[in-house]
Image (cartoon, rainbow, N blue to C red):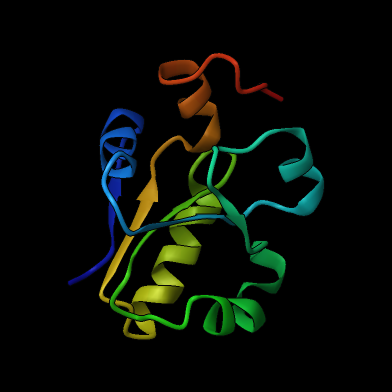
Amino acid sequence: MAFREINAPEAKALLTGNGVRLVDCREADEFAICKIDGAELIPLSVFAEEAPRKLADRNATILVYCHHGMRSLRAAQWLDARGYADVISLAGGIEAWSLEIDPAVPRY
């Protein structure tokens, strides 16, 4: 299955289930400002080196997000090209999450 893109409400619904790996592909300084609860940081700048080790289960559902959704698309494409079965990118990134789901998440 090719990677797909979902909006913030769809992501929230997906995260209420079990077994979704939530990956933040922003940089550490951005992660320090805000994050979605349960996210693990794998910055895009080191994604090719870190993702294969940290995301060993290629059959897991992986939801990737960034600030606005562009870096997460690149990360999702990268995972998809390497045989990951269920990769999803959050359209609009954490900005959309803050605006549509959780206004307590700081915007920057």
Residue under the image location 33 percent in, 34 percent down = 12
| Mark count | 0
Residue closest to the far left: 1
Q: Position of residue 26 (x, y in %)?
A: 66, 51
Q: Position of residue 25 (x, y in %)?
A: 60, 56
Residue closest to the far front: 18
The quarter of the picture where the N terminus appears is bottom left
The quarter of the picture where the C terminus appears is top right
Q: Position of residue 23 (x, y in %)?
A: 52, 56
Against 12, residue 107 (above or below) is above
Residue under the image location 39 percent in, 85 percent down = 82
Is residue 70 left or right of 106 when viewed as pictured?
left
Is residue 47 left or right of 84 when viewed as pictured?
right
Is residue 9 left or right of 43 when viewed as pictured?
left
Against 38, residue 62 (above or below) is below
Residue under the image location 82 percent in, 46 percent down = 29
Is residue 62 left or right of 38 when viewed as pictured?
left
Q: Position of residue 48 (x, y in %)?
A: 60, 80
Against 76, residue 40 (above or below) is above
Residue under the image location 56 percent in, 76 percent down = 54
Residue closest to the far right: 29
